[in-house]
Amino acid sequence: MVQKLQNLKETASQTAGPYVHIGLMPTYAGNPGSYEQEIGASPISEGAKGKIIEIRGQVFDGTGNAIRDAMLESWQPDASGIFPGQPGADPAVSGLCRFAADADSGEFVLKTVKPGAFRGRGGSHNAPHISLWIVARGINIGLNTRIYFEDEDNANDRILKAVELKHRVPTLIAKKTGDGQYRFDVRLQGDAETVFLDI
């Protein structure tokens, strides 16, 4: 029988940060030289096949202020939709990138190759996208979401089709701002709250 905890009060939750950069991105935190090369410094290396793109954005809190200590990780396949380690994968695409919001503006930049569509479990269609994991002060656990592209055919993507509140689907779509340039903002709360995935 489970004991009722009537005499105990809930303790405050621990949040990720604000010190995640010290261990995970020491150069960014002002401590260069901890690693020969930091993990995920770039998802691509020279010679990566496909179109090189740049995604800019900010992470906004519930009051609309840009979060300046956000750290993000992205994961993606190559331009053909093949993930690192799979047969035929582009050896110049590691797929992983770890990056941080600018400490002054909160703006982040992800430079990578545009991913290709791929077939997932059971042959499900996955439109071109980049998976994103976000941590920052005030976030209890990392948040998972995806970046899709407005200039791709997203109609049959299994995740976008599964979003029940269709008016929220645009929160997962990066807007094209120029040739190879996209904008993707993340909103933690509010009417335009980004769709987060429980994975």
Image: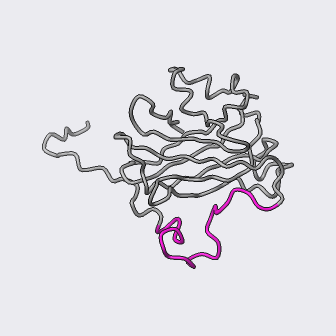
Which residue: 15% across, 39% down?
6
Q: Is residue 75 above or below residue 150?
A: below
Q: Is residue 189 left or right of residue 94?
A: left
Q: Is residue 104 left or right of residue 174?
A: left
Q: Which residues are magenta?
A: 22-46
Q: Is residue 27 above or below residue 65?
A: below
Direction bottom: furthest residue: 33
**Residue 110 in picture, x, y percent from top left:** 63, 52
**Residue 36 in picture, x, y percent from top left:** 64, 76
Between residues 25 and 176, which one lies in front from this camera angle? 176
Q: Is residue 163 above or below residue 91?
A: above
**Residue 103 in picture, x, y percent from top left:** 45, 60
Which residue: 59% across, 41% down?
183
Q: Give residue 5's quadrant in the image.
A: top left
Direction left: furthest residue: 7
Q: Please state, as top left, top right, bottom left or bottom right, where the N terminus lies in the image.
A: top left
Direction front: furthest residue: 178
Between residues 163 and 167, which one lies in front from this camera angle? 167
Q: Is residue 198 left or right of residue 87?
A: left
Q: Is residue 40 magenta?
A: yes
Between residues 59 and 35, which one lies in front from this camera angle? 59
Between residues 150 and 14, which one lies in front from this camera angle? 150
Principal SS element in the magenta part?
A: loop
Q: Is residue 193 magenta?
A: no
**Residue 25 in picture, x, y percent from top left:** 53, 66
Q: Is residue 94 above or below residue 127?
A: below
Q: Please state, as top left, top right, bottom left or bottom right, where the C terminus lies in the image.
A: top right
